[in-house]
Image (cartoon, rainbow, N blue to C red):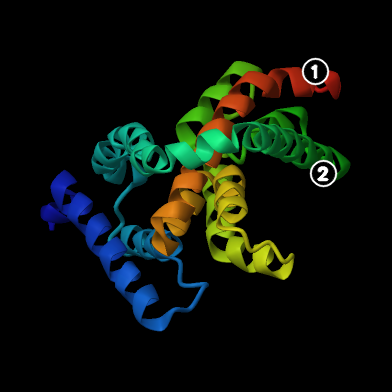
Amino acid sequence: MSYLENTFFLLAITFGLYFLAKLLQKKTGFILLNPILLTIAALIIFLKAFNISYDTYNKGGQLIEFWLKPAVVALGVPLYLQLESIKKQLMPILLSQLAGCIVGVVSVVLIAKLMGASQVVILSLAPKSVTTPIAMEVTKSIGGIPALTAAVVVVVGLLGAILGFKVLRLLNVHSPIAQGLSMGTAAHAVGTSTAMDVSHKYGAYASLGLTLNGIFTALLTPTILRLLGLL
């Protein structure tokens, strides 16, 4: 069954599973049936069942990874549609994103340190709230483990997508702007995708949160870690 290890067959399986997972969530509306989570679980089972190595699968996965950065850039389209509204609130948005960046980095590294994590693990966790390409580059620059960072970023994104809007509603945060910014800041591209499913306005502000938090995290993470005595 050599076709099972064919790059394009594995690519088709990935897209097919994701499509079916999207349909399942749409039909059930069950919050835990996140399409990305379901696709990851189904792919692991498939690869294990047919004894296909990750290296073999990743030959096709790299074709998907190639589009990750252009996909992030494409999020600028809904952002542009809300440009006039954003200009009117630029200063509060910038300050909220700066606060989100600092709290995101400080909270995760202090919790990790209190729980006895090693230095390299702490450094790998610091950029956990930004999209994968940015997070991995930040981790490389501060001496962390990029692979660990990538895994943590996925988990953070999934948790944000599954629980983000629920938590915001529990905290009586009802503004589409605040909700969108929060999802993009805390749950990066996965949270932005979830916000986009709600409406283009939510998606636009989530895109803005993702972008600004990515910039602030890339610029400020080394400084924050130095101030905390971790670099």
Q: Is there CB contact under 8 Å for labels 2 and 1?
A: no
Q: Position of residue 3 (x, y in %)?
A: 11, 54
Q: Nearer the viewer, residue 180 or 140?
A: 180
Which residue bears the numbered disc 2? 111
Q: Residue at x 47, y 42 (%)?
A: 207
Name the one closer to the observer, 97 or 37. Answer: 97
Residue depicted at x 21% and y 52%: 10
Q: Residues within 10 Å of mark 1 (few under 14, many from 20)?
A: few
Residue that sits furthest to the bottom in the current view: 28
Q: Looking at the rendering, which quadrant does residue 7 occupy?
A: top left
Question: For the residues marked 2 and 1, what is the alpha-carbon distance in whole angstroms?
Answer: 17 Å
The quadrant holding residue 219 is top right
Which residue is pictured at 68% across the width and 21% down the height? 220
- Which quadrant of the rendered structure holds the N terminus? bottom left
Q: Is residue 46 above or below residue 227?
A: below
The residue closer to the viewer here, 156 or 177, is: 177
Between residues 184 and 55, which one lies in front from this camera angle? 184
- Pinpoint residue 229: horizontal percent, then vertical percent: 86, 20
Left or right for 204, reference 103: left
Element at badge 2?
helix
Question: In the rendered structure, which amino acid carries the disc numbered 2?
Answer: Ile
Above-or-below relation of 202 to 123: below
Q: Quadrant of the C terminus?
A: top right
137 displayed left or right of 64: right
Query: Which label is found at residue 226?
Result: 1
Dot 2: within a 10 Å radius of its alpha carbon, few (fewer than 14), some, or many (20 or more) residues? few
Answer yes or no: is residue 147 visible. no
Residue type, mark 1 in image: Arg
